[in-house]
Every structure is written in C-alpha cells, then in structure tokens.
Image (cartoon, rainbow, N blue to C red):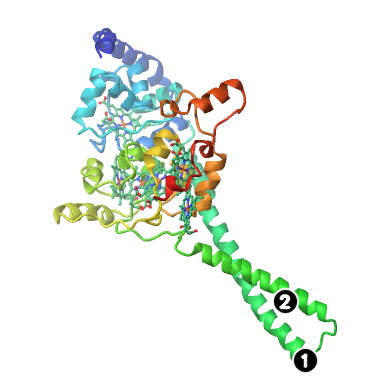
Amino acid sequence: MNITKTHVKPLFKNSGYISGLFFLLTLLFSTPSFGQTADDANNFAQCKACHTIGGGKLVGPDLKGITERRDEAWLIKFIQNSQALVASGDETAVKVFNENYKIPMPSHKLSDDQVKGILKYIAAGGKLPTGAEPAKTTAKKSEVSTTQQISEAERFITEKRESSHKLAIFAIISGILVVIILIDLIFTHILKAKWIHYILLLSSLWIIGEWSWDVSTDFGRQQNYQPDQPIWFSHKVHAGQNQIDCEYCHFTAETSMHAGIPPASVCMNCHSQVKEGKRTGKKEIDKIYAALKNNKPIEWVKVDNLPDFVYFNHEQHVKVGKLECTECHGDVEQMDQIAQVNTLSMGWCLDCHRTHKVQFTENNFYGAYKKLHEDLKAGKIDQVNVKMIGGEDCAKCHY
Ligand code: HEC
Ligand code: HEC
Ligand code: HEC
Ligand code: HEC
Ligand code: HEC
Ligand code: HEC
C-alpha cells in the first residue's frame, strides 16, 4: 500500500503543471484544426449514457473541462480501467469514486490513441471541426451493422426450434403413411410386393421413434425458454451497450453456488440518476422505484432451472474452472430478453467435462492431484480435462 502511495504522490504534485501544459498544448495544436475526427465522436457515443459535456451530471460527472482538471496519462488509465486505478489506491481515482456514490465506471477496450481522440473531442465541447465527416453517417453505419448481426444466440434458438418442428412434421406424415400402408397391406392390395410395405413401415416407425425420443428427452427441460419479466430489463442495454460487468450485478458468481439476481438497491446505484430509458421512457424504470417504495422485491422469473437432484456450483466453474459466462449462457450481451440457450441436460454437462481442458498448472486449486502433476511432467499425458479430476463421478452431481 505504502509503496503505491509514494509512487503516486510525486505524480500528483506535478499534475497541476502537467494538465496545465497539456491544456496549453491542446489549445495550441488542436483548437485551430480541432484534430478530433468522426471516429472520436463515435467512440464517445459509448460514454453518453453516463456523461454529458456541459449538460450536467448523469451517472458519472459532467466531463466539461476534464482535460484541464486532470492530466492525460491519468485520464487514459482511468478511462481504460477505472476500477484498477481505484484498487491501486490512486488518491484522485478513489476520491472521484467515493464522490460518485461508489458507482464503478465500466472498463473500456480503447487504445491510448482512441482515448486521446475522445479527450480532444471533449476539449472541443463535443463538436467536430467543419469539414470532418459528420458523426451521423458513422453512427448510422454501426447501427445498421448491429441490426444486421443477428446475434448468435437468437440464431441458435431458431435453428433448434426449426429442427424440432421439422421432426414433428415428419412424424405426422409418417403416422399417416403407416395407416395408409396398413390399409393397403390388409385390404386394398394396390402394391403387390410386400417388402415395400415392410420397408416403408419400418422407416416410418423409425422417424416416429426419433420424434418421441426428442419429445421425451425434452421433458422437464426448457431449452429456449424465454419468459416475460416483470420489468423490461435488457442485458443488451446494460452488459452490451453500457459494458457493465456481469459480476457487478451477479456479484456472488465467483464466491458461491449461485450467481444470484441483484436486488433493486443495486439498480438504484445508477437509476437514482438515470430516470429514463431510450426505448421505454420512464415506464419501466418507475417500476424499480415502486418496488422500493412498497418494499416489495421485484419478482423476476427464473430462466435456467436444474432439477433439485442435481448439484451445480457457479464458484467451481467461474473461479476454479475459469469459464466465461457465455460458454454456458450464450451471448447474453446481445439479448434484450434472457433465454436459456443450452439444454442443461446431463449429456450437456458431461460433454464439456469430457473435453474441456482444465488450466491445471499454476492453479492453486489443483495442488492435491499429485499423480496427475507427475504424469504431466513425465509427458505421459499432455493435458488434463475435467473427467480426469472426477467430473464424471455420479456423486459429484447427484447426492
Ligand atoms: C455506465 C456508466 C458510465 C459509462 C458508460 C462511462 N462512464 Fe465515466 N464515469 C462513470 C462514473 C459513475 C464515474 C465516477 C465514479 C468512478 O470513479 O467510477 C465516471 C468517471 C469518469 C471520469 C473521471 C471524472 C473525474 O472527475 O475525474 C472520466 C474522465 C470519465 N468517466 C470518462 C468516461 C469516458 C471517456 C467514457 C466513454 C469511453 C465513460 N466515462 C463512460 C460512469 C460511466
Ligand atoms: C458451466 C456452466 C455455467 C457457467 C460458466 C455459468 N453459469 Fe450461470 N448457470 C448455469 C446453470 C446450469 C444454472 C442453473 C442453476 C440451477 O438451476 O440450479 C445457472 C444459473 C444462473 C443464474 C440464475 C440464478 C442462479 O444463481 O441460479 C444466473 C443469474 C447466472 N447463472 C449467471 C451467470 C453468470 C453471470 C456467469 C459468469 C460469471 C455464469 N452464470 C456462469 C451454468 C453456468
Ligand atoms: C451501473 C449502472 C446501472 C445499473 C446498476 C442498472 N442500470 Fe439500468 N440503465 C443504465 C443505463 C446507463 C441505462 C441506459 C439509459 C438510456 O437509455 O440512455 C439503463 C437503462 C435501463 C432501462 C431502460 C431501458 C430502455 O432502453 O428503455 C431499464 C428498464 C433499466 N435500466 C432497468 C434496470 C434494472 C431493473 C436494474 C437493476 C437490476 C438496472 N437497470 C441497473 C445503468 C444501470
Ligand atoms: C445491471 C445489472 C445486470 C448486469 C450487468 C448483468 N445482469 Fe444478468 N440479470 C440481471 C437481472 C435483473 C436478471 C433477472 C431478469 C432477467 O432474467 O432478465 C438477470 C438474469 C440473468 C440470467 C438468467 C438467470 C435465470 O433466471 O436463470 C443470466 C444467465 C444472466 N443474467 C447472465 C448475465 C451475464 C452473463 C452478464 C454479463 C454479460 C449479466 N448477466 C449482466 C441483472 C444484470
Ligand atoms: C462448458 C464446460 C462445462 C459445462 C457445460 C459444465 N461444466 Fe462442470 N466443470 C467444468 C470445469 C472446467 C470444471 C473444473 C473445475 C474444477 O476443477 O472444480 C468442472 C467441474 C465440475 C464439478 C466438480 C468436479 C470435481 O471433480 O470436483 C461438478 C460437480 C460439476 N462441474 C457439475 C456440473 C454440472 C451439474 C453441469 C451441468 C448442469 C456442468 N458441470 C456443466 C466445465 C463445465
Ligand atoms: C456433471 C454432472 C453429472 C454427472 C457426473 C452425472 N449426472 Fe446424472 N444428471 C445430471 C443432470 C444435469 C441431470 C438432469 C438432466 C435433465 O434434466 O435432463 C441428470 C439426471 C440424471 C438422471 C435422471 C434421468 C434423466 O435423464 O433425466 C439419472 C437417473 C442420472 N442423472 C444418473 C446418473 C448416474 C448413474 C451418473 C454416474 C454414472 C450420473 N448421473 C452422473 C448431471 C450429472
């Protein structure tokens, strides 16, 4: 802690000069030609949900004059990953964080140059130089491409539904065929060769068998299940467009069995400020206030359900197994409405356990598996999968 502090202080004393110098430089070099481009305006679009330039505070502070208040190196670090800076103990970052009711700003995958561009755009008051390509066209382009990109998840769901539908239609046709064949075999005798009857009968029955297996294995499972929720809560708006970290809301995913659903008080971290949405206006956000006022929890409908006799643990998969949420829940960032994308069947769990490589070395959790470590070193095996550490034992999932 001390080390970081002494490391940070000298930078701090100079920050007045540095930011002053920086501002002078921006004045000297950028203002006449502006220097910022349509790309910068486009990059700033992802900040707009939480910041204005001279329009007052939203979720985060008004950014007007920010390049005068802070030095550039600090701003780049903060904008790329503010939480890392807060965690390092940086005084200014901690102060800004505390002053803003400890609402973390999401990290941004922006290069140093992209951030510099955004800063120029902010310094110019959010205006583009005349002659630069207007931001509108670029913004439109990206809008079109996102609507064109049908999300993986949705396509996956439609494909699955379609293949089930096709099978059902085949089964119905086969059923009718069976009746016709039987009638001909017993009464009408239009087809003379009996073996044709038998082949047709067998293949029809096989299709019907496939279909009933498809239906029965779906029993109790609900792949593609996408219930309506009490509030139109969109993961696309929050986790996608605003890049809020999954674990900001599902904060127990790494530390407990359940990922958990955030209480309304977590929503209020932001919605005490953000009172209107682009698509639903005040209507949906007002329901959060109503829930808090009436002291009634929001009754979210659970989407992913395992039967009671199965044990599943998030911490084990997210923290120990180092899996991404998307590997099991699909492309949540693209979903306005959450759906269950995988079957959650026993076969699905086992398929992954048989093939998924465990990050075995340099992972404290696997210290106990001495034999496997020795085998790895000796070159007897070249990787460890979940099955080898007991991922197929019945008792691990059923107890
Ligand atoms: C989801 C909301 C959100 C988004 C999106 C967001 N910010 Fe922030 N920003 C905040 C909050 C909240 C704070 C203050 C609290 C903190 O330290 O995290 C903040 C703080 C800042 C600060 C520090 C202000 C100061 O007084 O030192 C800067 C600079 C900043 N944001 C720039 C940006 C830029 C540039 C973008 C877009 C690339 C962006 N932010 C996107 C919420 C957001
Ligand atoms: C290995 C697959 C897997 C991974 C990885 C995974 N989940 Fe889950 N998740 C599940 C299953 C299976 C359920 C259903 C659990 C049940 O019904 O008991 C579930 C349930 C949930 C629920 C419902 C509430 C709960 O806790 O049961 C939430 C929210 C959730 N997951 C979020 C996440 C987030 C966020 C991540 C990433 C940090 C994540 N999950 C990673 C498989 C996974
Ligand atoms: C870290 C900040 C943050 C948290 C936490 C948060 N939101 Fe939001 N929410 C936003 C931002 C930013 C917007 C976008 C506002 C806009 O449309 O410009 C938004 C928009 C919305 C909208 C309107 C969407 C639209 O387009 O009309 C609803 C409804 C909503 N949030 C519900 C919730 C609920 C429910 C929770 C709690 C489970 C929650 N939010 C938690 C930041 C947050
Ligand atoms: C702003 C808060 C917030 C963020 C950020 C967020 N979620 Fe959620 N999540 C919720 C709420 C509220 C629900 C319950 C309503 C619903 O199902 O849409 C939920 C539901 C879910 C469910 C369904 C749980 C069930 O009922 O089985 C999954 C899976 C999930 N989230 C995964 C994720 C993943 C993965 C991310 C990151 C990409 C993420 N969430 C980011 C608030 C959030
Ligand atoms: C996408 C891959 C994946 C899927 C799907 C998956 N798992 Fe896992 N699972 C892992 C990994 C990786 C580990 C290793 C983590 C560890 O060593 O504890 C693991 C470990 C486990 C363990 C501990 C095994 C042991 O020997 O300690 C249990 C129990 C478990 N999973 C249950 C389930 C259940 C139940 C499901 C289905 C609902 C499931 N898993 C689906 C990847 C997966
Ligand atoms: C990685 C986790 C995992 C392991 C290991 C596992 N199961 Fe399962 N099992 C499940 C899940 C998940 C379900 C729920 C399946 C569903 O809803 O279709 C299930 C369901 C079942 C069922 C109910 C019938 C059904 O298909 O729905 C039986 C019986 C069963 N398992 C027996 C076993 C036996 C015996 C073993 C050991 C050889 C075993 N399981 C190992 C995860 C596991």
**In the rendered image, which quarter contains the N terminus?**
top left
Three-letter amino acid code of the residue under disc 1: Thr
Distance between the alpha carbons at the discs numbered 1 and 2 = 16 Å
Q: Is residue 185 visible?
A: yes
**Mark 1 CB within 8 Å of ligand 6:** no
* Residue located 21% across and 45% down the image: 265
Residue 151 visible in image: no
Identify the disc placed on residue 384.
none
Whether residue 168 is situated above or below residue 311 in the rendered picture: below
Position in image of residue 137 (x %, y %)? 49, 41
Residue 126's x, y, as percent? 35, 31
Q: How many marks?
A: 2
Residue 191 lies in quadrant: bottom right
Is 77 in front, or is 172? 172
Give the residue at mark 2: 201
- Where residue 341 appears, as percent x and y from the top left, is 48, 53
Label 2's element?
Answer: helix
| Image-based side of 129 in relation to 104, left or right | right
- Residue 8 % position (x, y): 28, 12
Is residue 350 toward the left or the right of residue 88 in the image? Answer: right
In this view, the residue in front, 90 or 141, is 90
**Looking at numbered disc 2 in the image, what kind of residue is underneath it?**
Leu
What is the quadrant of residue 245 in the picture?
A: top left
- Provide the residue designation for mark 1: 188
Residue pictured at 67% horizontal, 73% vertical: 205
Could you tell which of marks 1 and 2 lies nearer the N-terminus?
A: 1
Is 190 placed above or below 335 here? below
User: Looking at the image, which is closer to me, 15 or 161?
Assistant: 161
Q: Residues within 10 Å of mark 1 (few under 14, many from 20)?
A: few
Q: Residue at x 27, y 28 (%)?
A: 64
